[in-house]
Amino acid sequence: MEEAKPSRTALRVAMRRAAHQIYDSPLVFEDPIAVPILGEEYGEELRRDSVSRDQPFSVAMRAFIVARSRYAEGNLRRAVEAGVWQYVLLGAGLDTFAYRNPWPELHVFEVDHPATQQWKRELIARNRIAVPENLTYAAVDFERQSLSERLAESGFDENAPAFFAWLGVVPYLTLPAFRGTVDYIASQAKGSGVALDYGLPRDAVPPMERMALDALAARVKMAGEPFRLFFTPDRIAAEFVAFRDLEDMGTLEVNARYFQGRRDKLKWLGSAARLFSAWV
């Protein structure tokens, strides 16, 4: 087995979720596992980053990360209340839901690249976080392996509805890989749903935002995880024509729902990223 190599983007996302628990009040997204999962090694990196925590870009990125997590788990609650008992995290990264899952009957499937998943499992063990019985790890390379086959091998019931969280993944996919996953979710039992985030094309954002988007794109490319796939709201709606109850949220809607009335500077800035959900 190859040595586990952490995804730098997954680590940065986890660090921003942890920073939110430490520095922001009131919390938009409460996650008591976000800090412990980092352990001493990455906890030290988090403390070193404290100098930049109040910079506008850092605050906005933190807001984006916690808003999309809350959005996904809010939609998950809707699914559970409707009787769904399977939750699939596509590109789970260091997501912590499975380790604080309030529903014993909800089975969680964490899907991720083998190396990233191995790294996470090592962190979980090293930092003594209990792995619940209603969690299953499914290692999948989205570009080369069949999601349906790997989930079926992991005990996923395709005859029962499921909710899928697809956060921080879509911009890194090819269009065929994206469409393959959408088709798979569309084939699930009635009552299934999905929540995801996506990015607008460069020419669809204001000129000043393009500079920030270019800088972010350069950083993730240097980390070996380049952006590939973008959508406008009309184009992504067309990809989900087989679904119902589509919701597409931009900055104004997200800030009104999650950041209204705050006294600090925590809010979502810019227009390049959006939240989206749809139901089978």
Image (cartoon, rainbow, N blue to C red):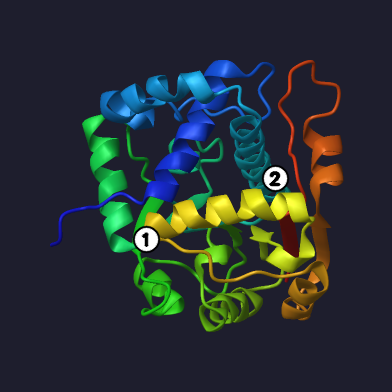
Q: Which mark is residue 204?
A: none
Question: Is 36 displayed left or right of 199 in the figure?
Answer: left
Q: Amino acid at mark 1?
A: Gly
Residue 124, percent across and down?
29, 37
Secondary structure under the numbered disc 2 in the rendered image? helix
Question: Front-most of 91 and 106?
Answer: 91
What residue is drawn where x is 52% and y is 77%? Answer: 174
Residue 181, percent across and down?
55, 75
Q: Quadrant of residue 125?
A: top left
Question: Front-most of 109 and 111?
Answer: 111
Within 10 Å of disc 2 (Cα), the crowding (few <14, some 14-19, many 20+) is: many
Question: Front-most of 162 and 28?
Answer: 28
Q: Quadrant of the C terminus?
A: bottom right
Question: Front-most of 211 and 44?
Answer: 211
From where the camera sits, is residue 167 visible?
no
Q: What residue is shown with label 1?
A: 224
Q: What residue is shown with label 2?
A: 71
Residue 225, percent across and down?
42, 61
Within 10 Å of disc 1 (Cα), the crowding (few <14, some 14-19, many 20+) is: few
What residue is drawn where x is 55% and y is 51%? Answer: 216
Q: Amino acid at mark 2?
A: Tyr
Farthest residue in the left direction? 1
**129 up-or-down from 272: above or below:** above
